Every structure is written in structure tokens, then in C-alpha cells.
Image (cartoon, rainbow, N blue to C red):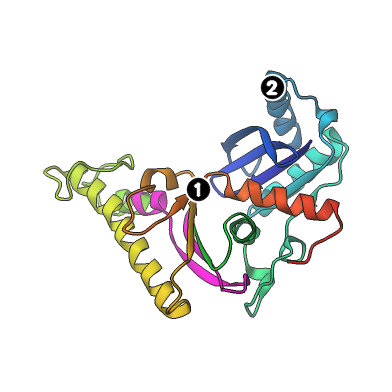
Amino acid sequence: MFLAIDAGNTNISFAVFHGRDVVASWRCASERHRTADDYAVWLMMLFQLKNIQFQDIKGIVIASVVPEADFALGKLARQYFHQDPLFALASTVGLPVDVPEPAEVGADRLINALAAKVLYGAPAIVIDFGTATTFDVLDMGGAYVGGIIAPGLQLSLEALYNAAAKLPRIAVQKPEKIVGNSTVKAMQSGVYWGYIGMIESLLQRIRMEYFEGETEIHVISTGGLGALFAGHFGQQVTYDDDLTLKGLQVVFERQQRGFLAA
């Protein structure tokens, strides 16, 4: 078994793999001051519920976009699991990266792109509904060629609430009608259908710029809020909530074989 850890700005996900199968997975809120001991106590209880022991873990791979969490997660791996963790970076993912500064690309984005390539094929576009809403593009040869970073859904809602004194804080949900007959319903419609409109427009523009004449492009969405939009786009989009963790499984498997080329 091995442990995959995906440390994002909003949540940190943990998944135990046995081969390519997810045995168990959990998610907690990202807290930059959480210590290795905090993670260990929390995980120990969850492991016990699944009848898993720390000593069953024979490897740990980490994707992190939260530098403040890296030390605690590394200490967790070494002190409690007695494993030297593999941090997934541009140099360790094993994916061709055709951008001027590959090191600037977030590890989670490269992991998502790798998972999309291995599991779905290229060309592909990955949409990740996280703290930011990101688009990542694989060209016809399977190389990462860049993407788009837009404000995330929750960030947009918080900005709207904080900037407009009379607008309430609302939950994200699909409204019954496009035209809201109350302030809350109008806001929900603007957020929900506005995001769908943004995504459909950006997908169309990516297709025009990179894939003119290409009929089959795999579009995969992931991230917690991705489920809310699944099935409501004007084109085929596959939702895969565990895409990043599956990408970490690919990285770990390749590392075990000593193979990190794409």
C-alpha cells in the first residue's frame, strides 16, 4: 500500500492505494499551522476505522501548492510512516512541459494533466474547480502547453459579499430558473450560469486556438464543486473527482519502476 497526499489551498486529500485501487480516502480543510502530530493523530483514527496500520504504508507521494504545509507533511511521512516522501514536481511528474518556465506550473496541475493523458488520452483539457478555476491543456502529442487561471467560485462569492453591503452570503447551487425573482436566486443564477457560460466560452476558444479541425478532445473536470456542474455543459465533459489522486498513483508507480519519462 502507499499513501497519496494532495495539499491544496482549500483542502488536503489523503488516499491509501493498494496497487491501482483506492482502499480509502479522506479530506480535511487546509490549515497552514497544522503540525505533523496533528495529521498523525487524525489519520491514526481514520486508519483504524479501515483496519489499516501505519506500517502497511510502503511509500508516500505528495503534491502540494501550499509551501507552509510541506514541512509538516514531510515530517509526518518520515516520523510516523518511516518513509522518505516523493514530492511531485515538474521534474518528477514525467510529463513533457512545453512552456517557458516549467517550474512555475503548479504540481497539482501537472498531476491532473498526467492523469488525463494516461486515463483518457490526448489531446485533453482539464478543468479543476478549486480555490481557483484552472484549465490545463495537453496538445495532440500529449505535451502540457499551458492553461488558464480564473477566480474560483467561492472566491467570487466572497468578493461579491464583501464588496456589496446589501448582498448576502449564499450557498452555491443550481437555480430553478435563469431569471431569479429574489436577490438570493438572482445571485445563484449569476454564479451558476455565469460560470457555465465562462467555461463553455473558454473551452470553445481553446478549441479554436489549439485544436482547429480536431474532432475528439477529451475534457475532464475535477475538484469538489465540479460535481455541481457535471452534466450541465453544452458539450461532453467527464467528471472525475479523484483525478489528482489518480495522477499521484501514476507518479508513484513510475517512480517504483524507475521510469519518469512520459
Residue shown at 33% from the left, 42% from the top: 172
Q: Is residue 108 left or right of residue 250?
A: left
Of the residues shown, which amino acid type is indicated by label 2?
Lys
Magenta segment: 132-157
Task: Find residue 231 and report its horizontal and vertical position in percent.
Answer: 36, 48
Residue, disc 1:
223
- The answer to whether one can see residue 128 in this image is no
Label pair 1/2, CB-CB below 8 angstroms = no
Alpha-carbon neighbours of circle 2 within 10 Å: few (<14), some, or many (≥20)? few
Report the residue that reaches farthest toward the left.
181
Name the side, left or right, on which 227 lies relative to 108: left
Disc 1 from disc 2: Cα separation: 24 Å
Residue at image point 73% right, 61% down: 93
Q: Is 197 rendered above or below residue 240?
A: below
Q: Quadrant of residue 51?
A: top right
Which quadrant of the view contains residue 33? top right
The image shows residue 98 at horizontal and vertical percentages of 64, 77
* Circle 1: element type: loop
Residue beneath disc 2: 50
Q: Which amino acid does label 1 sit on?
A: Gly
Residue 42 point in image, percent of width and height: 68, 27
Q: Residue at x 38, y 68 (%)?
A: 202
Residue 250 lies in the magenta-colored region = no
Quadrant containing the N terminus is top right
122 horizontally vs 254: left or right: left
